[in-house]
Image: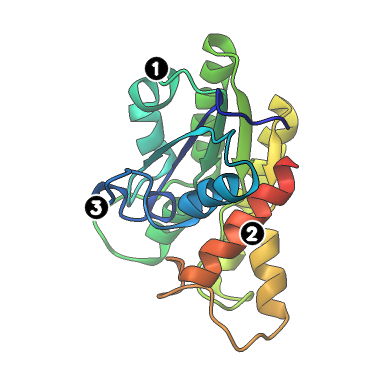
């Protein structure tokens, strides 16, 4: 994929994408999105794309849908990278007063947002698998995530998008029994987790 200084690359998702972007003077946050941007700077210093981060902590797919018009469709992006699903599942495990989004609704709402991209823009879509819930491949959260990962695969095939196998990369890493953690709390990335996300994304778009 040819990404140049004229390209506008938009990332949208939850807190993993957000990564304190509002505390960052560049508004791209301190997570995997920044690492992707920094890789472009290192590899093609005269052809750095515009990076737009529209992650918001706590978002489920229905929250993305509510802000899709302003935060996606009106941004004139050439590439739109979507990372969602963790909170849709996590809310099933925690009593927070916020409703989870179960698989059928997740698929329906997600599909509707992608239809709007196809109908109203010329952007290339990139779908990212949701990552992990707890650093144990057999945790209840990771078992529940399997269905959501399958839905992302289904939608990627349906809409002919690039697919970033982030969940797969994380599960494979966890099964390696490395002594190093990927998250600070089972969900939010530490620097290694952000690096694995960025590397997996960059490997996918090559």
Label 1, residues with CA under 10 Å away: few <14, some 14-19, many ≥20? few
Q: Please tell me whether residue 177 is drawn above or below residue 182 in the rendered image.
A: below
Residue 53 versus residue 158: which sits nearer the camera?
53
Question: Residues at badges 1 and 3 in contact (C-beta under 8 Å)?
Answer: no
For the point 36% across and 51% down, the residue is 29
Label 3, residues with CA under 10 Å away: few <14, some 14-19, many ≥20? few
Quadrant of the snapshot with the C terminus = top right
Res. 46 mark: none
> How far across and how far down the image is residue 34, in percent?
46, 51
Q: CA distance from mark 1 to mark 3?
A: 23 Å
Residue 145 left/right relative to 177: left
- Res 190 visible: yes
Which secondary structure, mark 2?
A: helix
Which secondary structure, mark 3?
A: helix
Residue 13 versus residue 42: which sits nearer the camera?
42
> How far across and how far down the image is residue 55, in percent?
38, 43
**Quadrant of the image occupied by residue 69:** top left
For the point 58% across and 35% down, the residue is 46
> How far across and how far down the image is residue 198, in percent?
59, 55
> How far across and how far down the image is residue 163, in percent?
70, 42
Residue 191 versus residue 181: which sits nearer the camera?
191
For the point 50% across and 74% down, the residue is 134
User: Which marked residue is nearer to the observer: mark 1 or mark 3?
Assistant: 3
Q: Earlier in the sequence, mark 2 or mark 1?
A: 1
Res. 23 mark: 3
Res. 167 mark: 2
Residue at the spot of label 1: 74
Q: Please tell me whether residue 44 is drawn above or below residue 130 in the rendered image.
A: above
For the point 73% across and 50% down, the residue is 203
- Res 132 visible: no
Question: Residue extending furthest top?
Answer: 120
Question: Residue extending furthest bottom?
Answer: 179
């Amino acid at each position: 994929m040819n990404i140049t200084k004229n390209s506008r690359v938009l990332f949208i998702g939850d807190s993993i994408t957000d990564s304190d972007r509002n505390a960052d003077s560049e508004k791209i946050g301190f997570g995997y999105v920044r690492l992707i941007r920094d890789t472009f700077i290192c590899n093609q210093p005269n052809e750095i794309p515009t990076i737009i981060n529209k992650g918001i902590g706590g978002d489920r797919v229905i929250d993305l849908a509510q802000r899709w018009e302003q935060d996606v469709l009106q941004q004139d992006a050439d590439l739109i990278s979507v990372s969602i699903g963790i909170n849709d599942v996590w809310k099933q495990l925690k009593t927070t007063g916020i409703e989870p989004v179960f698989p059928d609704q997740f698929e329906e709402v997600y599909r509707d947002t992608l239809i709007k991209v196809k109908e109203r823009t010329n952007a290339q879509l990139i779908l990212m698998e949701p990552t992990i819930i707890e650093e144990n491949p057999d945790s209840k959260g990771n078992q529940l995530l399997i269905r959501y990962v399958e839905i992302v695969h289904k939608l990627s095939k349906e809409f002919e998008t690039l697919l970033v196998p982030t969940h797969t990369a994380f599960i494979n890493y966890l099964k390696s029994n490395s002594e190093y953690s990927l998250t600070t709390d089972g969900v939010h990335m530490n620097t290694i987790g952000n690096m694995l996300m960025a590397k997996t994304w960059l490997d996918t778009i090559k």
